[in-house]
Image (cartoon, rainbow, N blue to C red):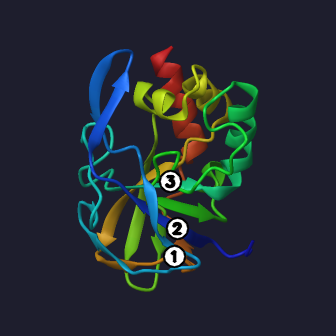
Amino acid sequence: MSDSPTLHSINLAAVSPMLIEGRRIMSGINKLPVSTLLRPTAIAVGKLGLAGDEQADPTVHGGLAKAIYAYPLEHYPFWEQACQQHGSRHAGTTLHHGILGENLTISGLLEQDAYVGDVLEFADCQLQITEPRQPCFKFQAHMDMRLAVKLMAQSGHCGFYLAVLQTGTLQAGERFRILPGPRQLSMAEAFRRRLHRLD
């Protein structure tokens, strides 16, 4: 894996129904890779997110401040082990990029090093870090683990949302630079504070 922050895949989904405890719930969590290191297709980036991506509930994911969701590839072994330990239907498989519901699977930038206001500068667009993800019941159902939300809370492996500062295109395999913002609040600390308020 490269030492430079890298975009490994771009993952999109249309809104589709999920069956959760007998209820039909609409969700866009079922992201699948459409641009990968092997097939680095360019995807258009607009102010409200990636072309071809949909969100069912813009209060959770969507809008200008949460247009794109990024997740560190470094956390994937944690989730593969968790799926194995907790009897998820994903146990024993290599989790595909996007399974955490993220649009961008990245490496080289973890929550403790990502701050509100930092900018991810790609060749043709700029994305600004805004806030951590807050896991919900849809995530738990999607991962097929009763403890999925608790595990994300305990581990701090939450990923983060991005606003689009400069529209353009993205494609897998791109490296990006991190342009520091005020550096006052990291995603790790913002996530801890949010969880504390929910207790």
Marks 1 and 2: CB-CB under 8 Å? Answer: yes
Q: Nearer the viewer, residue 50 or 38?
A: 38
Q: Which residue is mark 2?
A: 9
Q: Taking 134 as reference, is 145 left or right?
A: right
SS for callout 1: loop
Tag 1: amino acid = Ala
The residue lying at 63 percent from left, 29 percent from top is: 88
Q: Quadrant of residue 57?
A: top left
Task: Please indicate, yes or no, whether residue 178 appears anywhere in the rendered image.
Answer: yes
| Residue 45 location (% of width, % of height) | 30, 72
For disc 1, the neighbor class at 10 Å (few under 14, some 14 to 19, many from 20) is many
Q: Earlier in the sequence, mark 1 or mark 2?
A: 2
| Residue 97 location (% of width, % of height) | 56, 57
Up the image or down, 78 lies above or below 102; here it is above
Up the image or down, 64 lies above or below 132; here it is below
**Which of the numbered marks, if any, corresponds to residue 172?**
1
Up the image or down, 9 lies above or below 130; here it is below
Up the image or down, 68 lies above or below 61; here it is below
Q: Which residue is mark 3?
A: 98
Marks 1 and 3: CB-CB under 8 Å? Answer: no
Q: Nearer the viewer, residue 47 or 33?
A: 33
The residue lying at 65 percent from left, 49 percent from top is: 112
| Residue 22 location (% of width, % of height) | 34, 15
